[in-house]
Amino acid sequence: MIALTHLPKRPPVDITFTDLSYSVSEGRKRGYKTILKCISGKCKSGELTAIMGPSGAGKSTIMNILAGYKTSNLSGQVMINGKERNLRRFRKMSCYIMQDDCLSPHLTVKEAMMVSANLKLGKTVTLSEKKVVINEIIENLGLQTCIDINSSNLSGGQRKRLSIGLELVNNPPVMFFDEPTSGLDSSSCFQCLCLLKSLARGGRTIICTIHQPSARLFEMFDHLYMMAEGQCIYRGPVLGLVPFLSSMGLNCPSYHNPADYVMEVACGEHGDYVQKLVVAVNAGRCTKFATPDHRSSKIVSNDIAKEANGKNSSGDVISVPNGSVKPTTPTTPVTCTTSLLDSSENLSPTEKNGFSTTGLQQFTILLKRSMYMILMDKTLTRMRLVSHFVIGCLIGLIYYDIGQDAAKVTSNAGCLFFCVMFMMYTAMMPTILTFPLEMSVTVREHLNYWYSLKAYYMAKTLADIPFQVVMTLCYIIGVYFITSQPLDVTRFGMILLVTVLTALVSQSFGLLIGAAFNIEGGVFLGPISTIPMVLFSGFFTNLNDIPFYLRWLPYLSYLKYGFEACMIAIYGLDRPKLTCNIEYCHFKYPKKFLEQMSMKDDMVSYFIDVGVLGGLFIFLRVIAYFMLRIKLMQNR
């Protein structure tokens, strides 16, 4: 048994909900479908509560409502310690651990815990104190042996424990778990439930959905909330389930798992008992089978309990069992009367008004993490670097030494257009593929109030820029010098600026698609959306030859601005006449070639193109931000 003596102190929380109903729209003609039908119940601190039911019974819905993630199309009341819930503050003092363990794959256990501590504890806690908290949690969760292992290489049980540890840093008094045993073997399931039991015995309110636990796991729960058809068919202690069913004429056979039996009843396999059970529950017949409050006989030896009873704290005792739950020593029971939402003595000033850290602190921490994760993503980062350099050299060899040849200006224009198009695809597609995966981590952290969406988005945007510059530089160096483009620092800088901006605009476009669609939709829509960009870029068709009713479309193509700026950088600015190794070269004077392409030879046109690309970058990033915000709101 190891005491967590450095966690922040929190008051215990009892959650009461009354007459909750929830509906979802099925379309204009079909109206609304009712998911929850006037259900009531209570989740007490110090108890491990299970929400069970068949698929479609509404257990995930009620979990999301209690966690504060669903607020629309909802009626009823949720109370915290007998007082109306302040949703914003409740969300800051609770956490939701999802079924899929959404973790940053390129961070080790220790690194992930440090990021969590920096964001959730803020600057008021010193680095040494944060390390003590992290080490205690890691030791309690049994993660000492994998402290330097990337989360992507952890086992299922280790990932689940790390997910819990990340949220345990600020000691939330309420913890929600969606199918915590999903995907785990029997041993890992038992250890996970033992951990949740220990967390509950620490005075926390632990609520989890679970589909069909084994008898061994089922008896570990203190309280059961059983659902069927959007209604409650049993609420009360687990030990009172079988007697209650017997009183209703449903006798669970000996040596039969009560969890399996009540699930069969909920599915109607033993007759139409659902409505009878609902009526009995609403009439209060479950209370006849209630057992004495376990909190009067079990340990609640922690800062929460002592804070509630006005006594000195002896530490929050949590253990990760290897085979069984260790017995605990009785102490004074918890009788919490402090309201989490109306009391301020347990909250720091930053927690009362916002996040534990300021926006600037969040931005700094997230920027460091984003850049570090890009560096640690050896597969994607190295692959992109190598591919940019190799393809750049290959294109340079294909168009070898044509930059000064007046007879090959059209081929050189093709080379420049390919450069712009290559930067478009290589920047957009990786973003479309990776951002939906990254979003799962963002959703978990943002909804658990680690940071604001603005801080995350600004950090991600700024972290992308230097790496995109490096990628572009690796490509342009090979192409520019092998193809014998003008050896002029100004022209090289102009080309580099345009290709970087084109890549950033394309990446922003990919970010927008990735935020709006899943991977399958993004992979299809991304390449398709580039076809109009390519067609109206000015390379395949002279802009003056486009029908008048379509001449507005090229102005929507960012490839048009990128290609035009590249052409001006290479053939504009009063470049001297080109070398002609044959009898006649029509485009010996570069300005004549620009006129043929319907392009102007002046710096004003170049800066207009650069300005439009910069504006598109900002515009698409802003649109992607609001799309991401809408996507996050849809999870509520």
Image: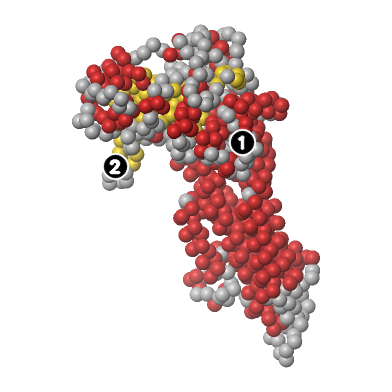
Which residue is labeled 1 in the image? 146
Query: Is 478 situated above or below 614?
Result: below
The N terminus - image quarter = top right
Query: Is 183 situated above or below 532?
Result: above
Q: Is residue 527 visible?
A: yes
Q: Residue furthest bottom?
A: 583
Front residue of this view, candidates 7 and 403: 7
Q: Is residue 169 visible?
A: no
Label 1: few (<14), some (14–19) or many (≥20) C-alpha neighbours in 10 Å: some
Residue 13, percent across and down? Answer: 48, 19
Front residue of this view, candidates 263 and 20: 263
The amino acid type of the residue labelled 1 equals Cys
Which residue is labeled 2 in the image? 31
- Residue drawn at x 28%, y 18% is 243
Q: Quadrant of residue 458?
A: top right
Label 2: few (<14), some (14–19) or many (≥20) C-alpha neighbours in 10 Å: few
The C terminus - image quarter = top left
- Residue drawn at x 72%, y 82% is 406
Query: Is 393 situated above or below 277?
Result: below
Secondary structure, mark 1, is: helix
Front residue of this view, candidates 306 and 300: 300
The amino acid type of the residue labelled 2 equals Gly
Q: In the picture provided, is 274 more to the left or to the right than 167? A: left
- Residue drawn at x 51%, y 38% is 156
Front residue of this view, candidates 143 and 494: 143
Q: In this rendering, which labeled residue sits more in front, label 2 or label 1?
A: 1
Q: Tell me the tag on residue 49.
A: none
Q: In the picture provided, is 135 more to the left or to the right than 262? A: right
Secondary structure, mark 2, is: loop
